[in-house]
Image (spheres, rainbow, N blue to C red):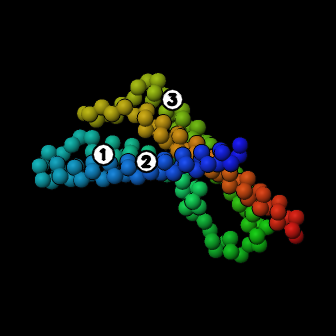
Amino acid sequence: MKNWISVVNRNTSAYFAYTGGLVLAAMLFIVLYEVWMRFVQNNPISWAIEVPELLLLTVVYLGLGYTTRANGHIVMDVLLMRMTPLRRAQFGIVTSLVSAAISTFLTWYLGLEFWISFSQQWYTSTVIKVIIWPFYLMVAMGGFLMILEWIGKSVTNWRDWRHLRRAA
């Protein structure tokens, strides 16, 4: 059961990261279109700021689970190189749990934003009305995957710590 959950989480994180890449490509085309309309056609588009902002938020959160799984987050190598493997495992447990707690808080808040925007049908304030709740939904789902990854890292560090403690 545990391996099945890990495979589903790994594949879901990868698909979210690929979707984030597609959203990033869409952002590129929106910005290029805005530059073309503003400087060549002298007719700027009104939604060129708000929509890429929402897309950037989506890209960041869609890639968080994959980044956490791939150890792409910021690590203090200078500090970790000086630690023994046992201390490194202890430090990993604490930092993973703190990261999971912070991620839970942020995801809970963004989940509430999703629910409010969904129930009240929020739109962007520009001329073209874009509904906001799908962006918040993707952000909350990306945050949830990141929480699962941090919990998985906590369990892995716990196992390493137990193994190293028995070996010592």
Q: Measuring 82% from the left and 63% from the top, which residue is drawn there?
A: 163
Location of the N terminus (image quadrant): top right
Horizontal arrangement in the rendering, residue 131 relative to residue 148 (left or right): left
Callout 2: SS: helix
Which residue does the numbered mark 3 point to in the structure image? 115
Callout 1: SS: loop
Q: Measuring 47% from the left and 24% from the top, which residue is drawn there?
A: 119
Other-residue count near label 1 (Cα within 10 Å), few / some / many at <14 / 14–19 / ≥20: few
Q: Is residue 22 visible?
A: yes
Q: Residue furthest left?
A: 41
Q: Nearer the viewer, residue 16 or 146?
A: 16
Other-residue count near label 3 (Cα within 10 Å), few / some / many at <14 / 14–19 / ≥20: some
Which residue does the numbered mark 1 point to in the structure image? 49
Q: Measuring 34% from the left and 52% from the top, which residue is drawn there?
A: 25
Q: Amino acid at mark 3?
A: Trp
Question: Residue 19's mark?
Answer: 2
Contact flag, marks 1 and 2 (Cβ < 8 Å): no
Q: Nearer the viewer, residue 75 or 24?
A: 24
Mark sitting earlier along the chain (2/3): 2
- The answer to whether residue 157 is above or below residue 118 is below
* Separation (CA) of disc 1 from disc 2: 21 Å
Q: Is residue 103 visible?
A: no
* Separation (CA) of disc 2 from disc 3: 22 Å
Q: Position of residue 166 (x, y in %)?
A: 88, 64
